[in-house]
Image (tube, rainbow, N blue to C red):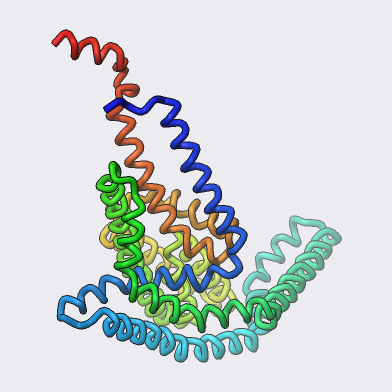
Amino acid sequence: MKEPTLLLLNRRVWIWALIFAGALTLFYLFKGILLPFIVGILVAYLLNPAVLKLETFNIPRILSTTLMILLFFIAIGGLLFFTIPFLKQELLLLAQHLPAYGERLYQTTLPLLEQLNDVIPVKHFNQLKTTASAYFGDMLSWGFKAIASILTNTLALANLLSLVVLTPVIAFYLLRDWPRFTSMLIGLLPLNHTKTIKNQLSLINQTLANYVRGQSLVCLSLAFYYSIGLKITNLDFAFTIGIATGLLAFIPYFGFLLGATVAFGLAFSQFNDWTSIGWVAAVFAVGQGLESYLLTPKFVGERIGLHPVWIIFALLAGGVLFGFLGIIMAMPIAATLSVIVRFTLKKYYASEFYRGISPHKHKAASAQK
């Protein structure tokens, strides 16, 4: 069979590039209504292995799908039922104690401010304090206004309502017909490349499964550790800070930095001795060590083939381009691109161009043999 010419290869590349650009454009244009569908696809993808397992016990797929969807959303609803009142109480307590924390923080940092007063002229120092106080007040005002806007924004409430109502329905139908959808997509593949593409899709699926399972274990383990560790130090809001720090660990270093910043701010305003603050620092130091040298290598490791820098870039790019929806889609897209890049590099290293072999010389050598 005659090999494709360079022109044909370039044409194929341009066709796939145009398809990708068109899909990205449509995704961007309809991002306002895609959230329930994307979440529904992810739920169906996560629950499909469990449904397949139930089918091995001769349970019909429609019954397996119904059972898994009910169990999944009942579990999510129960979690929210117990979590939301707890978070509401914590936020109310934080609002009540905020002035006291500010006063304690001021008293704790007063010696440092007095030292600065000796270095900086009184006139400039007073101006600095006035400016800092004004900025702090503006930040608090902006924060409360942002929260109020989120809670009262009609579009945000509509999106939340559509997510709650539509996601279970979409997930149910997708999970029920998952084999039919996958068979239809496989049937669209070029016959000459079906085996290769199926192998790459299997690698993408394996990468995503390893990442989701591994990162979930890491986040849950860190949430448990930070909650218990900070509670032992008697830090206020220990459970809230610990759970948030652990659950945000899927963004490399972000959960640790955010949790440590909030915890140290509270520690400086709550404790009057450096020993207690040191224990809080020790909790985060040990937690970072556990995450970097034990949990992540053990549960995630090199199996996914995704570098932390690539993960950070994917999450930031997804968030900037498509908001919360982009953050949800960042890891599947990153895993897909990583598999495609590795496959492309493998083909490149095996190519005659990389090895410096001219096709004409190769044919001439074959003819002489």
Query: Taking 329 as reference, is 100 above or below it?
Result: below
- Closest to the observer, 330 or 193: 193
Please state the horizontal and vertical placement of residue 78, each as a whole percent of the image.
Answer: 41, 89
Q: Residue at x 45, y 83 (%)?
A: 234
Residue 89 vs residue 103: left or right?
Answer: left
Extreme residue toward the right, this view: 123
Q: Quadrant of the C terminus?
A: top left
Please state the horizontal and vertical placement of residue 225, each as a whole percent of the image.
Answer: 36, 74
Total labels drawn:
0
Quadrant of the rendered structure where residue 137 is? Answer: bottom right
Residue 46 vs residue 118: left or right?
Answer: left
Q: Residue at x 24, y 14 (%)?
A: 363
Q: Residue at x 59, y 77 (%)?
A: 159
User: Do we see residue 348 in this rendering?
Assistant: yes
Extreme residue toward the top, this view: 368
Please state the horizontal and vertical placement of residue 177, each as a whole percent of the image.
Answer: 34, 72
Residue 11 vs residue 209: left or right?
Answer: right
Quadrant of the rendered structure where residue 155 is? Answer: bottom right
- Closest to the observer, 228 or 300: 300
Q: Residue at x 47, y 78 (%)?
A: 167
Extreme residue toward the front, this view: 1
Q: Quadrant of the N terminus?
A: top left
